[in-house]
Amino acid sequence: MVSVDHFKQELTAQIGRASASGAKDVLINSLDLYGSILLGSCATESCCDAMQDAMKAGDILHIERTHSAGMTVRYLLSRESVALPPKQGKQYVTPPNTDQSCQN
């Protein structure tokens, strides 16, 4: 069975590859991340949990986990030097959808 840890490992690997290539950030979609783990069972919730757990200050949630397009996050790759202005938190670019494919 696919666990949150499987997705955390793949997410960490994708962030590491982007950082090694010199990128400043990386945009990762849950449907793409889910598709990169070919272990069989349905685990979209675990995938979104892993993505949400990996979010740090300055990362931007572009698409909610409940949206049919799949949760999408822009992770900053210089994570230690990020300082957020007060009250910024997560930023929502698209409105949430009622699709339940990746909801708690």
Image: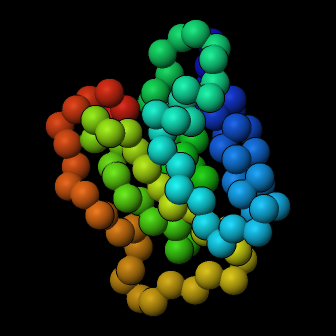
Q: Which residue is at the far front?
A: 21
Q: Is residue 7 above or below residue 64?
A: above
State left or right for residue 14 relative to residue 55: right
Q: How is the image coloured?
A: rainbow
Residue 21 shows in the view: yes
Residue 66 shows in the view: no
Q: Is residue 37 above or below residue 84?
A: above
Given residues 28 and 100, the one toward you in this image is 28
Q: Which residue is at the far bottom?
A: 85
Q: How many marks?
A: 0
- Where is residue 44 drawn, in percent x and y? 46, 27
Q: For residue 16, which quarter of the picture? A: bottom right
Q: Residue at x 22, y 49 (%)?
A: 96
State left or right for residue 98 relative to residue 62: left
Q: Is residue 84 above or below residue 54?
A: below
Q: For residue 104, which quarter of the picture? A: top left
Q: Residue at x 53, y 49 (%)?
A: 28
State left or right for residue 67 relative to residue 90: left
Q: Residue at x 54, y 11 (%)?
A: 41
- Where is residue 23 drawn, in percent x and y? 69, 68
Q: Residue at x 20, y 55 (%)?
A: 95
- Where is residue 65 drawn, in percent x and y? 36, 43
Viewport quadrant of the N terminus: top right
- Where is residue 12 drawn, in percent x and y? 72, 47
